[in-house]
Amino acid sequence: MKKKLIIAIDGYSSCGKSTFAKTIAKELNYLYIDSGAMYRTVTLYCMRHGLVDNDKLDLQSIVNELKDINIEFVYNPDIAEYETFLNSENVEKEIRGIEVSRHVSRISQISEVRTRMMELQRQIGMFKGIVMDGRDIGTVVFPDAELKIFMTASVEIRAKRRYDELKNKGVEIDFEEIRRNIVARDITDENRDISPLRRADDALVLDNTRMTVAEQMTWVMNIIEKKINGS
């Protein structure tokens, strides 16, 4: 049996981390852990139980009920994707809604929520064979991951990718506005109090400014093959 790995992918926004992580997971038949979906699921739970509204959070109740929240990712062969389950209920579509998006930022900033999500992420990763992306995966969640990658790209390229993505969805937006938003988000990610964006000392840097997804996959699969074979 081939050695299974924990692959942690961190990096700046709009670097294509999720696409990269999902592609690696499919190639290796690994589980992709969508950390963003986990925070969205907690947010949905809080909304359903009246713990969050437009004005305030019932912080103490949220903290008290975290123990009752269990999140799993279950493979759906019909769509060849993993779907998110909250306490055995498929909530994949519901957590992508606008209402959840409106509240998830506040929920994800609660330190107790982040601690609980880290516990669940480590439980899921107990048997390895996982790929997870975020901003503190290799430094906080899985500091002992066998492969850590830190993704980056120039601000201009990241802004262009985001601009093209939105244009393809029919969203009209100013390129310079996107660029300013990315710069501001970088500053926020690097300076937040809880789990700021940092490159792990043993992470490999992937600057994909001038790389296609196929070129990135060639690069990473060569590294993974060596890790699996112990060379």
Image: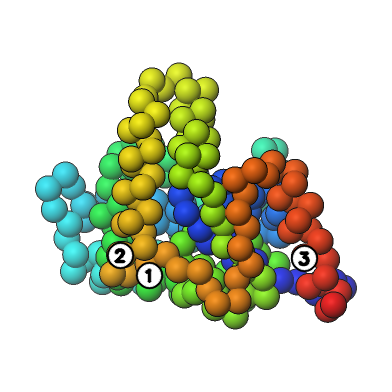
Residue at 63 percent across and 58 percent down: it is 206
Under mark 2, the amino acid is Arg
Under mark 3, the amino acid is Ile
Label 1 with label 3: CB-CB less than 8 Å: no
From the viewer's perspective, is residue 120 above or below residue 188? below
**In this image, 88 relative to 50: left or right?**
right
The disc label shown at residue 159, or none: none
The disc label shown at residue 192, or none: 2
Give the residue pinned by disc 3: 224
From the viewer's perspective, is residue 18 above or below residue 167? below
From the viewer's perspective, is residue 126 above or below residue 27? below
Residue at 76 percent across and 56 percent down: it is 219
192 or 75: nearer the viewer: 192
Residue at 49 percent across and 74 percent down: it is 139
Residue 112 visible, this angle? yes
Query: 10 Å neighbourhood of mark 1: few (<14), some, or many (≥20)?
Result: some
Residue at 52 percent across and 39 percent down: it is 157
Query: 10 Å neighbourhood of mark 3: few (<14), some, or many (≥20)?
Result: some
Q: CA distance from mark 1 to mark 2?
A: 7 Å
User: Which structural element holds mark 3?
Assistant: helix
Residue 26: horizontal and vertical position, in percent?
Answer: 73, 51
Residue 231: horizontal and vertical position, in percent?
Answer: 85, 77
4 or 59: nearer the viewer: 4
Render colour scheme? rainbow
Earlier in the chain: of badge 2 and badge 3, it is 2
Q: What number of labels is visible?
A: 3
User: Which structural element holds mark 1?
Assistant: loop
The disc label shown at residue 195, or none: 1
